[in-house]
Image: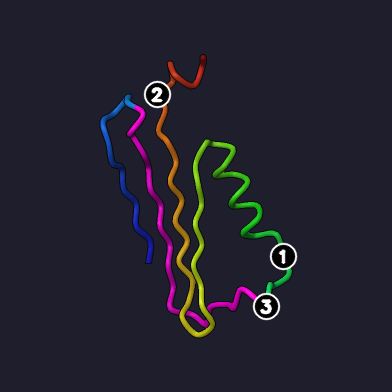
Amino acid sequence: EIHLGRKGTPGQPDDIMTVAVEDDGVGSAASRPTPGLGLIGMRERVEALWGELSVRSALGDGYQLTARIPVQSRNESAS
């Protein structure tokens, strides 16, 4: 399931884009990290946009990833 949303006032600091992805798969236990760079790469890309990424998962309960990224106008990003 994928959810997209935007909250706040356009052009203001509270203007945030939210992307949430969740599944009902097997999930993962935090004590059993899996190989790969998928979540690391996602976090780096979101943080490069001054955003934050949260990941929740439990064994047998799927994943939920949520990225919150501030929206900037073209004028703001040029400064």
| Amino acid type, mark 3 | Arg
Whole-number angstrom distance, CA of label 2 to CA of label 3: 41 Å
Residue sitting farthest toward the right? 35
Q: Tell me, for residue 67, which label it has, or none.
A: none
Q: Of the residues shown, which amino acid type is indicated by label 2? A: Ser
What colouring method underlies this structural image? rainbow
Residue behind mark 3 = 32
Task: Name the spot of residue 37 as percent of width and height, x first.
Answer: 70, 59
Q: Is residue 67 above or below residue 63?
A: above
Distance from the alpha carbon under mark 3 to that under mark 1:
13 Å
Q: Residue at x 26, y 31 (%)?
A: 9
Q: Which numbered disc, 2 or 1, marks the residue that appears first in the sequence?
A: 1
Q: Which residues are magenta?
A: 13-32
Depth check: 53 or 3 in front?
53
Magenta region's main secondary structure? loop
Residue sitting at the far left: 9
Q: Nearer the viewer, mark 3 or mark 1?
A: 3
Queried whether the magenta region covers residue 52, the answer comes back as: no
Q: Secondary structure at mark 1?
A: loop
Residue 36 image label: 1
Question: At x 27% / y 36%, what residue is drawn?
Answer: 8
Q: Position of residue 23 (x, y in %)?
A: 44, 73
Task: Say what secondary structure mark 2 lies in.
Answer: loop
The residue indicated by pointer 2 is 73
Q: Dot 2, how many residues are within 10 Å of its Cα: few (below 14), some (14-19), or many (20+)?
A: few
The residue under the point 68% across, 72% down is: 33
